[in-house]
Image (tube, coloured by chain):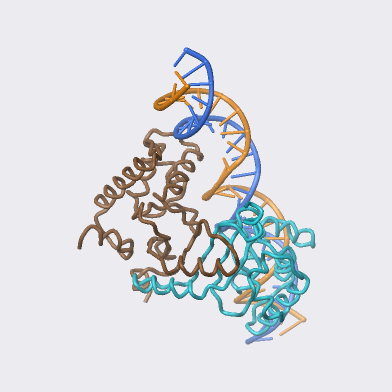
Chain colours: A cyan, B brown, C orange, D blue
Amino acid sequence: MTTEQKHSDPALAFAAHDHAHCTGDVLARAEELSAETGARLTPVRRRALEILLESHRALGAYEVLEKLAEAGFGNQPPVAYRALDFLVDQGFAHRIRRLNAFAACMHPGEAHSPAFFICRACDAVAEAPAEAVRRAMEAAAARIGFSVERMNVEALGLCPTCAEAAS
Amino acid sequence: MTTEQKHSDPALAFAAHDHAHCTGDVLARAEELSAETGARLTPVRRRALEILLESHRALGAYEVLEKLAEAGFGNQPPVAYRALDFLVDQGFAHRIRRLNAFAACMHPGEAHSPAFFICRACDAVAEAPAEAVRRAMEAAAARIGFSVERMNVEALGLCPTCAEAAS
DNA sequence: GCTTGACATGTTATGCTATAACATACGATA
DNA sequence: TATCGTATGTTATAGCATAACATGTCAAGC
């Protein structure tokens, strides 16, 4: 399996794998993209992204804040929210509203409309490409004259591991 | 235009129409369904649904609470949250996470996976049928062995009226 | 060099959203 | 009429998010 394939396989979000590896790759990609677009991936913002990547799960803003504070940054809520908002704006992270949480985007830069699959048993979150979902939404929007700017698509259920354990 | 068509036309959520009419129909349908399934549509719950139907937009739990209190029910948050949770469980209302709000379902009982289109300018919310979206999600879930139990599909953008006004 | 403006960060304070935990009431049933 | 399940009411608190203002930083233009 190549690195490319590995990172684009959403099932891996539910399985053990080499975090350090994908963390480094994604972070590097985020830096490239920032350089290209002029976005300023400052120390707090970069560290916030690292935190999301390292934990490799969805984190609440206050969890991120705590880790930012440990790294010497401010420890007031706006510090975390601003960094996270930046990451979301740049497409480096996604906000998962069902969990009031944020997760690093596993393939930044690739235009994609992410769909999230959230396990209600272990809280793991898989980000899967969902172009078909996006197309269906665009079509539904067109029928009512609505112009879509952003989308949140989230499913709650059981991941393979927990489904197995439950049976 | 028949009543059936009227209620199933999501564009109407963005247009003026006869609230009293659709409110009554939906409420009656909810009562039928409750009788069938044995769900207890008690006074608070019924009033909460009426409140959502009357306002005909997404309301925060505390807005609903305020109106429940006016009607003589308790005025502590759990009163509203419990009633709203019941309505969501029964499929009589939907939770719109992007707005931290709740909206009455315009066609309860009909199996449907709703998608919401939220205008960022006027906060109007249209509920559109999105079977194609649901199918795409099921397909994506199947590929990673995930079993979907619930879904939230929300789009942010501009409704026809506000898009017009902006141009 | 210095000023200015844009942007990022830090801090205080507060508001909004949601739930835990316990008390009370009510109806169905044995 | 005792009991169980369910619904409602209430107190208290936890958790999430942002407004508003102060400070710092850096680059462009005078």
Percent of width and height locating residue C16: 52, 50
Tell me: B145 left or right of B47.
right
Give above or below for C18 relative to B76: below
Q: Is residue B130 above or below residue D30?
A: above
Residue visible at 25% across and 59% down in the picture: B4
- Total label count? 0
Q: Which quadrant would the C terminus of chain B be assigned to in this image?
A: bottom left
Image-based side of B38 in relation to B100, left or right = left
**From the viewer's perspective, is B16 left or right of C11?**
left
Q: Position of residue A19 (x, y in %)?
A: 76, 69
* Residue B77 drawn at (x, y percent): 50, 40
Left or right: where B88 falls relative to B144:
left
Q: Nearer the viewer, residue B129 or B11?
A: B129
Question: Which residue corresponds to the image point at 33% horizontal and 63% vertical from the top-left?
Answer: B10
Q: Residue at x 59, y 60 (%)?
A: A118
Q: Residue furthest left?
A: B1
Quick one: B166 or D10, which is closer to the camera? Answer: D10
Is C26 in front, or is C16? Answer: C26
* Residue A2 sits in quarter: bottom right
Residue drawn at (31%, 44%) of the image? B32
Quadrant (top left, top right, bottom left, bottom right) of the N terminus of chain B: bottom left
Return the x and y of residue A7 as percentages of the image width and height: 68, 75
- Could you say which quadrant of the image residue B67 lies in? top left
Is A165 or A9 nearer to us in this picture?
Answer: A165
